[in-house]
Amino acid sequence: MTQHDSAAATSYPVDRDELLRIRSLKLLTSARDYVFFALQVDYPGKLNSAINVAAFCAPEGISYAARWELDEGDLYKALGELRKKGIVASISSQLNLQLS
């Protein structure tokens, strides 16, 4: 087994707590990247996701469902950037995301 093969066999799961830690260490440099990974944690493998914006964005301490400590304006801006990259196919008025 080569070194590359053994590295591929190792996994590094990223959950909410780990993503928040990575963000606090300033290892993610954009809201776009942060939102992309947060969507992967909350909606793994889903192509059409209905998002409760308030629950997705609200600061910690409101409820556990208020997950990502993110300003709603930053969420929409990040989603627009993800749309330009072709990752988010569409954003409807009810924030039903179609991910590609």
Image: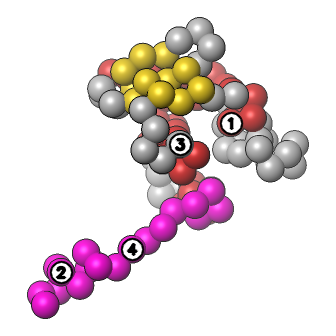
Q: Secondary structure at mark 1?
A: helix
Q: Could you say where residue 49 lies in the image, as x and y percent from the top left?
A: 53, 30
Which residue bears the numbered disc 1?
56
Circle 1: residue type: Phe
Gap between marks 1 and 4 measured at Cα = 26 Å
- Residue 99 % position (x, y): 40, 30
Q: Identify which residue is drawn at 43% across, 44% down.
A: 45
Q: What residue type is disc 4 on? A: Ser
Q: Report helix, strand or loop for mark 3.
A: loop
Rendering quarter of residue 59 = top right
| Helix, strand or loop under label 4 | loop
Identify the mark nearer the N-term, 4 or 2: 2
Say if mark 3 contacts mark 2, CB within 8 Å. no
Which residue is identified by label 3? 43
Q: Would residue 21 be found to the left or right of residue 32 on screen? A: right
Q: Which residue is mark 2?
A: 5
**Earlier sequence position, callout 1 versus callout 4:** 4
